[in-house]
Amino acid sequence: MPNPRPAVRFLVPGVALGVLAAVAYRGLTHLSGGDQTELLILAFAFIAGGALLRAHPRTTLMGIDINMCFLLAGEIGAPGHSLPVTAAGAAAMFIGSVVIATLMFFLSRLHPPAATA
């Protein structure tokens, strides 16, 4: 089985940036008044930022997490919830990623991956 440590170290920063982008998107959608063209352009700008990170080999894993968490927490393409509800969901997503990353880190120390030839 491959070593998960390289991917895990990008998990928490990627999720953090993704949920921050989602909360910012939802905050800005309330200011725009719900114009569909503005929402589409705004979502495209956030997704393009994550895609640029995805395109670089050193930040590819973080770019995937940023876009995935942005799309999930921001409820892109849906009417969405209020900003406090979105922020609570984003916080839950972030806390869950911290717990999973911590568990994976400690479990991989207890059972290090086998050396591959």
Image (tube, rainbow, N blue to C red):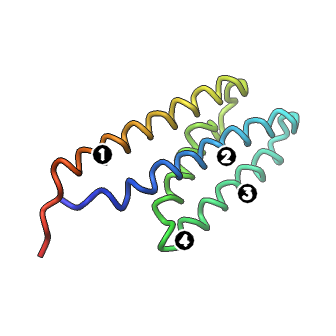
> How far apart are the alpha carbons under marks 3 and 1?
32 Å
- Residue type at mark 2? Ala
Using the image, tell me which numbered label, if any, was put on residue 45: 3
Pinpoint residue 20: horizontal percent, then vertical percent.
65, 43
Q: Quadrant of residue 26?
A: top right
Label number found at residue 104: 1
* Local crowd size for mark 4, using a 10 Å CA cut-off: few (<14), some (14–19), many (≥20): few
User: Which residue position is annotated with label 4?
Assistant: 55
Q: Along the polypeptide, which appears first: circle 1 or circle 2?
A: 2
Q: Contact, CB < 8 Å: mark 3 with mark 2?
A: no
**61 above or below 67?**
below
* Percent coordinates x, y for residue 44 in the rendering: 71, 55
Give how far apart the Cα atoms at labels 3 and 4 are.
15 Å
Does the residue at mark 4 contact the one at mark 2 (Cβ under 8 Å)?
A: no
Instruction: Tell me the SS state at disc 2.
Output: helix
**Residue at left 83%, top 35%?**
34
What residue sits 48% from the left and 74% below the top? 57
Left or right of residue 37, residue 96 in this image: left
Residue depicted at 52% across the width and 29% down the height: 92
Q: Residues within 10 Å of mark 2 (few under 14, many from 20)?
A: many
The residue carrying mark 2 is 21
Say what amino acid the circle numbered 1 marks.
Met
Say which label, 3 or 1, has the lower sequence index.
3
